[in-house]
Amino acid sequence: MKNKFKRNGAGYLFAITLLLLTSSFTSLGSRPSNEKLIRDYYAAYEKKDWNMLKSLLADGFTFTSPNDDHIDLAAYKERCWPNSANIKRFDIDKLMVNGDDAFVTYNGWTMDGRVFRNTEYFKFKDGKIKENACFFGPGISFPNNKGK
């Protein structure tokens, strides 16, 4: 037995390591990555799909921006979701994920060709988006802004 292990020890060690790694990620494997959640969040706006967006958000979700202070999901749907009608696409410039925190900087394009550049901070909990804080950059700030 000792000689067999010596001859095949590296193979056994590799198999055990692979088994341990696979089993430790099984529970995470059924969950989308936080990067995917972010990309799907913006895709929901591009597709104008409220149900898709809502499925990404955790219970107790809050949204903050220069115009909103930790508003809940109902207020978010009323105040922010109408912007989806004016969004053509998002071009993600930077996306940095660190565990359950992420920052995204993007250029958003409206249907009439205007651009807005924002940075957003996301907080995740149990595989869903728990918080989003939006920081307006140059341009029109948000799609329905008629000020610029």
Image (cartoon, helix red, strand yellow):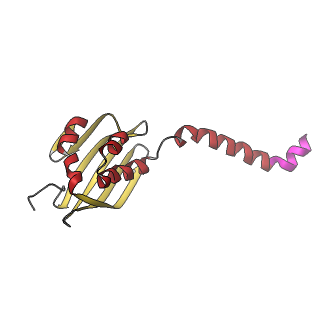
Q: Position of residue 75 (x, y in %)?
A: 19, 37
Q: Position of residue 126 (x, y in %)?
A: 43, 36
Tell me the quarter of the image containing the C terminus. Answer: bottom left
116 vs 11, left or right, is left
**Residue lying at 38% horizontally and 56% vertically, measured from the top left:** 95
Measured along the vertical axis of the image, is residue 75 above or below residue 48? Answer: above
Question: Residue 137's quadrant in the figure?
Answer: bottom left
Quadrant of res 51? top left
- Give the main secondary structure of the magenta stretch: helix
Please say whether residue 128 is visible from this viewpoint.
Answer: yes
x then y, percent, for residue 30:
52, 40
Quick one: which residue is furthest to the left in this view?
147
Rendered-image quadrant of the N terminus: top right
Q: Is residue 72 visible?
A: no
Q: Is residue 53 left or right of residue 67?
A: right
- The stretch of residues the image draws in magenta is 1-9
Q: Residue furthest top?
A: 60
Q: How many marks are shown on the rendered structure?
A: 0
Q: Is residue 5 magenta?
A: yes
Residue 147 locus on image (x, y percent):
8, 58
Q: Residue at x 57, y 41 (%)?
A: 25
Residue 115 sits in quarter: bottom left
Q: Is residue 148 magenta?
A: no
